[in-house]
Structures are given as structure tokens and as C-alpha cells.
Amino acid sequence: MNYGLSDNLHLGAIISDCWHSKLLHPENLVTNPFLADRLPDDLPSDPMHWAAAWIKAAHDGKLRRNSNSMTLVTLSAEGDPSARIVLCKEFVADPGYLVFHTNYHSQKGREIVANPKVAALFHWDGPGRQIRIEGMAIQSPTEESDAYFETRDWGARLGAWGSDQSAVLQSRDELIAQIRSRASALGADLADDLQSLASGDAPDIPRPPHWGGFRIWANSIELWKDGADRIHDRGLWKRKLVRSSEHEFSVTPWVGTRLQP
Ligand SMILES: Cc1cc2nc3c(=O)[nH]c(=O)nc-3n(C[C@H](O)[C@H](O)[C@H](O)COP(=O)(O)O)c2cc1C
């Protein structure tokens, strides 16, 4: 199942279905990932589908601003970790990867190229859910990056050209001047507020070649659900990834175990 996080129709249909026909069935409180208040006794064989449901529920339920945000950890060449928030823009339960977009020249972008091992972490306090994912990050196919870039508003597209993400700046004025000069090179004359054009039609802003998606292929996932008296529920699943092509891994089946809280 593929949850693009800008489309909430699918979840709406699922919730509606649950509400009208199945919500009151106690089994749903364990077996339906949207509604479950703990993990099933027999751990599901498809943890990515559960994770997808939790992410989708959080996003569409607008549990907080940027409900699809996640902490992303990368490693430097020396093995030093660094963490920052990025937005999960797509979650593909089968075969099991998620997508975020960034500047490939940023610190995280450069670190991933040197060492693709990453960790990603989601947490929503409302439903008491946490998802830990570890795996390998590889650049998205250009079509995926292009398709997402097209959905960004004009200012955000321009911003992708305007900022050399993670590079040192002498001052904010230097950044503004840089954005103006790059906008001008793209045929856009910016007004004082930067976001609007001083005159003329807005030119189309193409995707910068150094800006695009990364797919994180999971080889480990933990689903965590809070419980009374801190008797939380934890399921941990692992599998092996073998690189099969430029953008793909072949995967072994998930093997799940339950962990003490
Ligand atoms: C809510 C939120 C969402 C963000 N989303 C992204 C994102 O999707 N992609 C991105 O490159 N940076 C995003 N950022 C900015 C990053 O946290 C970070 O500052 C930036 O990517 C530079 O990180 P780096 O220098 O470690 O590469 C977001 C920040 C916040 C607070």
C-alpha cells in the first residue's frame, strides 16, 4: 500500500468503513492499525502497513502541525551522529520505504552519500505512538523528485535554488542578495517581500539538479504503543536488504519479536 501524504481520500474511506461497520467490534481495538490500542498478540507480518496507517492517521487527523515530520539521523565520516527534522512525503509499505526531500549538497545529503545508514523516528503524543526505522537511504529516481517538486508552491521552488543548505553565511543580507540574484537568473524579479514578483508573469521554476528525494529502505522497524503504568507495547521487526538496482533493494520477509518496555 502506498500512502502519498497529500491525499486523504483513502484514509477517509477506511475510517468511514470502520466507523459504520466495524468500529464497535472489540477485535478492531487490536487488529485494526488505525484504531488499535495495543499490538496484536500475534505480531502482524506486515509492520510497514501498520506504520503507514499510523503515519496516515496522524497526518490526516492533523494531530499536530507537520504531523508527518520525523527526526532523521545521519552519520559523519568519523561516525558522529547528527539529527534534524524532515518531512516524510511518501510512505510505501510494499516493498517498504519512505521518502523525504532535501538539498543533496546539505550536511545530511553529503553524509548519506558517504554512508547510507540512517535512522528515522516518528512520535505522536496524542495516540501514544512511536515508530523507529533504521535502514539505507538512496536517492529517489529523478521522476519522483520532479513530481514532488512540481507540487511545491512557487516560493518554495525558488527557495530550493536560493539556499545552499548547510553552507556558512556571513549575514542574512548575504542570503537575501543571493536569493535575488538567483531569482533574477531564473527570470524572476522579486518584490521586497521576496515571495512575490515585482512585475510580469511568474516564470516556471525547474527542479535544481542538487535538490530531490531520498528513499529510506527499512531493515528494522519498531512500533511502540504506550500503555498504562508504563507497560508499553513494543514490536521489533528486522529483515535483510540486498541492493538490486540503482533505486531498489530486494528484501527478505520481516521477522518480528516483542520487546520489554
Ligand atoms: C517541521 C520541519 C520540517 C522540515 N522539513 C525539512 C525537509 O523536509 N527537508 C529538509 O531538507 N529540511 C527540512 N527541515 C529543516 C531541517 O531540520 C534542517 O534544518 C535542514 O535540512 C538542514 O539540515 P542539515 O544541515 O543537517 O543537512 C525541516 C525543519 C522543520 C522544523
Image (tube, rainbow, N blue to C red):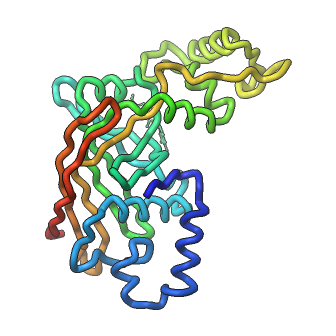
Residue 261, compared with residue 150, is above or below; it is: below
Q: Position of residue 69 (x, y in %)?
A: 45, 49
Q: Residue at x 48, y 90 (%)?
A: 24
User: How far across and how far down the image is residue 210, in percent?
Assistant: 46, 20
Q: Residue at x 30, y 62 (%)?
A: 47
In the rendered view, does 206 fall on the left or right side of 121? Answer: right
Image quadrant of residue 71?
top left
Of residues 128 and 22, the one drawn nearer to the viewer in this rendering: 22
Residue 17 lies, with reference to residue 70, above or below; the image says: below
- Which residue does the image show at 20% across and 23% down from the upper left? 77
Task: Tell me where residue 38 appears, x and y as whole percent.
Answer: 31, 77
> Against 98, is 260 above or below?
below
Image quarter in which the C terminus is found: bottom left
* Image quadrant in which the N terminus is located: bottom left
Which residue is at 65% across, 9% downward? 181
Q: Position of residue 139 (x, y in %)?
A: 38, 30
**Quadrant of picture, ligand 1:** top left
Q: Which of the 4 quarters of the picture holds residue 130?
A: bottom left
